[in-house]
Image (spheres, grey):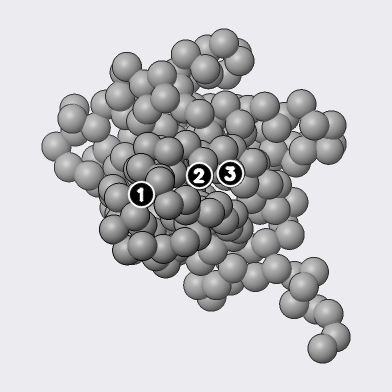
Amino acid sequence: MERVRTAVLISGRGSNLQSLIHARHEPDYPAEVVLVISNKADAGGLVIAEQAGIPAKVIPHKQFASREEFDAAVDAALREADVSLVCEAGFMRIHSEWFVKRWEGRILNIHPSLLPAFSGIHVHEQALAAGVKISGCTVHFLTAELDSGPIIAQAAVPVLPNDTAETLAARVLEQEHKLYPEALRLVASRKVTLENGRAVFPLIRNRDP
């Protein structure tokens, strides 16, 4: 089986990167991480890539005069590696509109809340302040609007009475590590696609009512 060539974009420790790399050990897994790109030279995920024998590239965003120029460098690296899918895993940069359009339907992002609730940053603090009883994580297709792309998959966790942002984050992260590889599996195997701005699940769509 030929696996879909996938790149992962990171800015930090790379725990979700690790889960995506680990998924390749499943014999029927349809995707393979072939490139890791970080905008920070000290990102812990670069060590994970090195240990796994995966090529990694640092593209510091501060070396570019504009967001568009930075995205052009990322795009060039992805194309040079013959990548078909991109997973953002703690990549702390907002892309320019042209980049998102070029990779439309082929770029995924994971967010530590049940979108559309609690987008942006300080997500767990937002959840605790709102008093919700359930939180979780979401994998979605990336769009130009922050944390607003069509949803591919979600996982929920309880919010406990004595939770802090740190304890809730740890519980959500456990689910992220399970959810992201499964969401990538769905996209790489074409069991979900982006069509007219919506996530479409062909196997479900074609069933009789």
Q: Residue at x 47, y 27 (%)?
A: 14
SS type, badge 3: helix
The residue nearer to you, when weighing 178 against 201, is 178
Q: Quadrant of the N terminus?
A: top right
* Dot placed on the residue nearer the N-terminal end, 1 or 2: 1
Q: Amino acid at mark 2?
A: Val
User: Is residue 57 positioned above or below 149 on the image?
Assistant: above
Q: Residue at x 73, y 59 (%)?
A: 191
Q: Which residue is mark 3?
A: 175
Q: Residue furthest front?
A: 162
Q: What is the x, y in percent for residue 195?
A: 58, 71
Is residue 70 something one can see in this rendering?
yes
SS type, badge 2: helix
* Circle 2 crowding by C-alpha within 10 Å: few under 14, some 14–19, many from 20: many
Q: Which residue is mark 2?
A: 172
User: Is residue 46 positioned above or below 146 on the image?
Assistant: above
